[in-house]
């Protein structure tokens, strides 16, 4: 468990008064306060009233999971002719780097204040949580006057390893206290998705979204087909699926998602150079610690848009994924642009 006294918060305020608050626990985003169409500010990021509640929380609220975000089938992968076994903490599978303090999201990172941002760093030794290679990780946030929160995730390793980093923020553009997000409209620049088995491990197929409830190629309310009878939705009690970014090119940052909410007029555009975006509609938020405003969370109160490599990529040679070797740099850029 993390000592609550070690948790430190960092506030960044831009020229128009919009504020982002970051935490050294999990290199996390704690708050994003932006105006609605009438200039009224609200915090559009889900989170907890007590900073200590972020430690080992199930939803990984606003934090950076790792070493490998998302799932690895049966907690096993092979590298260089050697097999590795990881903790199984999500049904029969490994999720987000492992349980408790095994996950980067539940560790205290070193922090350095920057102009309009914060740089968090973490060192993970060889064999940490079962992963090979001593890994150095950096999460650098900057907050601009045009309300773009940019996250650059970087890693280097002393031995060949696997790494997949993202941010697990949950958004509600009405405000964190405002209830479910089923009325939010979502557009994805993704005409394919990854079908899974019942444990949410990809089958290996890249399936077209056309004609299915997975089709967000045109803006659609999140709740429009949330309860449809369709395997991808029924396995996870809602959306918890990886979508394949159209025309993906390594190193190219481009828009992959647009989230909008009519009553507030707020819009969030997500940009990344990652090949996939995991859409998770907060299907299991009930029972979480109380919100920053003291509200009891319910399922579907927020939506996470996680830019990352595909789930189980180390076991799927057909997926766009490379191991990290000594002398190389892993990078993933994620931009949350609010207007």
Image: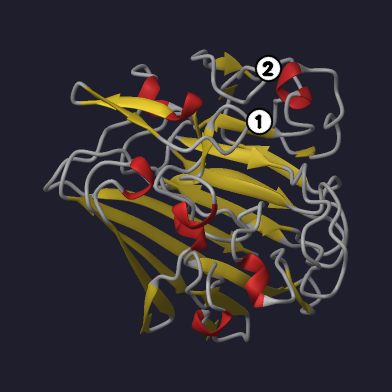
Q: Residue at x 37, y 57 (%)?
A: 153
Q: Which residue is mark 1?
A: 217
Front in this rendered view, residue 187 or 164: 164
Q: Secondary structure at mark 1?
A: loop
Q: Give the answer, above or below, for where 82 lies relative to 279.
A: above
Q: Examine the image and state in which quarter residue 248 appears.
A: top left
Q: Which residue is mark 2?
A: 210
Residue 192's label in the rendered image is none
Front in this rendered view, residue 208 or 68: 68
Q: Quadrant of the N terminus?
A: bottom right
Residue 17: x %, y % from top left: 63, 86
Q: Residue at x 36, y 16 (%)?
A: 318
The crowding category of the residue bearing disc 2, from other C-alpha atoms within 10 Å (few below 14, some 14 to 19, many at least 20), is few
Q: Quadrant of the C terminus?
A: bottom right
Q: Secondary structure at mark 2?
A: loop
Q: Residue at x 83, y 47 (%)?
A: 299
Pointers 1 and 2 in contact (CB under 8 A)? yes
Residue 284: x %, y % from top left: 77, 44
In this picture, residue 276 sits left or right of residue 319: right
Task: Answer whether residue 218 is visible to the viewer in this image.
Answer: yes
In this picture, residue 314 sits left or right of residue 28: left
Q: Examine the image and state in which quarter residue 267 appears.
A: bottom right
Upstream in sequence: badge 1 or badge 2: 2
In this picture, residue 43 sits left or right of residue 122: right
Q: Give the answer, above or below, for where 46 lies relative to 159.
A: below
The crowding category of the residue bearing disc 1, from other C-alpha atoms within 10 Å (few below 14, some 14 to 19, many at least 20), is some
Task: Answer whether residue 319 is visible to the viewer in this image.
Answer: no
- Image coloring type: secondary structure
Q: Residue at x 63, y 30 (%)?
A: 91
Front in this rendered view, residue 94 or 226: 94
């Amino acid at each position: 468990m993390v000592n609550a006294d070690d948790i430190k918060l960092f506030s960044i305020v831009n020229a128009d008064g919009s504020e982002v608050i970051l935490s050294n626990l999990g290199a996390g985003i704690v708050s994003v306060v932006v105006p609605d169409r009438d200039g009224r500010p609200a915090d559009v990021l889900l989170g907890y009233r007590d900073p200590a509640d972020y430690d080992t929380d199930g939803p990984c609220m606003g934090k950076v999971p790792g070493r490998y975000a998302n799932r690895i089938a049966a907690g096993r992968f092979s590298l260089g002719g050697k097999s590795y076994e990881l903790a199984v903490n999500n049904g029969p599978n490994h999720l987000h780097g492992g349980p408790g303090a095994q996950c980067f999201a539940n560790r205290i990172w070193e922090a350095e204040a920057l102009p309009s941002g914060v740089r968090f760093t973490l060192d993970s030794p060889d064999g940490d949580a079962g992963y090979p290679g001593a890994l150095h990780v950096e999460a650098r946030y900057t907050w601009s006057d045009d309300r773009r929160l940019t996250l650059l995730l970087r890693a280097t390793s002393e031995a060949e390893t696997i790494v997949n980093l993202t941010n697990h923020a949950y958004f509600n553009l009405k405000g964190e206290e405002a209830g479910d997000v089923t009325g939010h409209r979502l557009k994805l620049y993704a005409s394919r998705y990854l079908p899974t088995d019942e444990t949410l491990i990809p089958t290996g197929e890249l399936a077209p979204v056309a004609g299915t409830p997975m089709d967000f190629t045109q803006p659609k309310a999140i709740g429009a087909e949330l309860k449809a009878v369709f395997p991808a939705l029924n396995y996870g009690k809602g959306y918890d699926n990886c979508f394949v970014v159209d025309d993906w090119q390594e190193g190219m940052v481009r828009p992959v998602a647009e989230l909008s909410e009519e009553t507030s007029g707020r819009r969030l555009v997500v940009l990344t150079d990652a090949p996939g975006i995991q859409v998770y509609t907060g299907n299991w938020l009930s029972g979480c610690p109380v919100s920053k405003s003291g509200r009891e969370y319910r399922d579907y109160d927020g939506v996470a848009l996680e830019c990352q490599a595909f789930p189980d990529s180390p076991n799927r040679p057909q997926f766009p994924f490379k191991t990290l070797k000594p002398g190389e740099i892993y990078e993933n850029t994620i931009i949350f642009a609010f207007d």
